Amino acid sequence: MRKLKFFLAAALAAFLFFVGNGAHLTAYAEADKYYIGGMTAGFMLSAQGTEIIGLSEVATDEGLCRPAEDAGIKIGDTIVAVEGITVKTIADLNAALNRSGGKEVTLTVKRKGDTAEVKLTPVKDKKSGKYKIGVLIRDTVAGIGTVTFINQRTYRFGALGHDVCDENKNSLGISDPQVYLCSVIGVNKGIRGKAGELRGLFMNDSAIGKADKVCATGLYGTFRKAYDFSHCELVDIAPLSEATIGKAVIYSTVDGVCPQQYEIQIAKVDAGNKENKNFVIKVTDERLISETGGIVQGMSGSPILQNGKLIGAVTHVFLNDPTRGYGIGIENMIKE
């Protein structure tokens, strides 16, 4: 098992898809029931290019060179194309640089959602003979998040509840479709001004499903039919029109692999919000506050229930108050 941590910023905004009126949702809910999630799962995601995680020197016959740094490339940038040809993996980038033969190339670079073109000249590494630009890169990102629901009939699941991005706000895709159960082994508690995070281990021998879609409202796929659902509560879903200010609960895993129920208050309902912030919630359960400080990264997707029905999922945390955060209405996830 490998130790990995989830760094999708819980405070990131996302886009919201509307899925119709409450009458449509009620009819849909009558036909299907949903297992409550709350279990923590591990995902392997694609950086949708080659992400720069470090800058370095290249030793050439003429001396040390820093082509990428000199061209203005920064840590956190993602190279998505060379000379207009898409690169998605480290191998793609290396092949493109070697094709250059040491001539100037144009890189298409993403930085915090913006795209720009950068010109630079690869140099030949003295030791390997390969053309390089002086970067340390990765093409996949590992993380953990919380499963929100599993449809009893179709076994389709939804998780996270917000756009899937890295810490630089670059969108991620699916690298490995396998979804693994994750054991939470520790928590960095949230404090005012800094989001906390769950620390977990991928249980590589415990694949619980396959992911096939990421979008503005989270990550989706199909659970294994062999998964033991005996510990999962089966509920109906409810539209935002049924949500009210007052008591509710969330299901989260902050230790081991077993979800626990924690008390919260819904402080505001905003059905028209377009950033996946349909609820303002406040953690009131002293157990959760003691263990995590409130909402932390990795809890995104924790199902929200009110009056015994699934109404949404935790999506964001208030950085100035980790006991408070936002949630998305479940109808905006179910449609996906």
Image (cartoon, grey):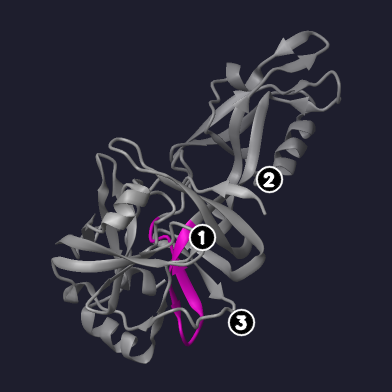
Type of the residue with mark 1: Gly
Q: Which residues are magenta?
A: 145-162
**Do labels 1 and 3 touch, CB within 8 Å?**
no
Residue 89's disc is 2
Give left or right: position of 255 versus 311: right
For disc 3, the marked residue is: 226
Res. 256 mark: 1
Classify 10 Å Cα crowding around label 1: few (below 14), some (14-19), many (20 and above): some
For the question of whether residue 112 can be seen, the reply is yes
Residue drawn at x 19%, y 62% as measured from the top left: 265
Along the line of sight, the residue nearer the viewer: 302 or 65: 302
In front: 245, or 73?
Answer: 245
C-alpha distance separating marks 3 and 2:
33 Å
Q: Quadrant of the N terminus?
A: bottom right
The Cα atoms of the two marked residues, 2 and 1, are separated by 33 Å
Residue at position x 68%, y 23% in the image: 134
Q: Amino acid at mark 3?
A: Ala
The answer to whether residue 65 is magenta is: no
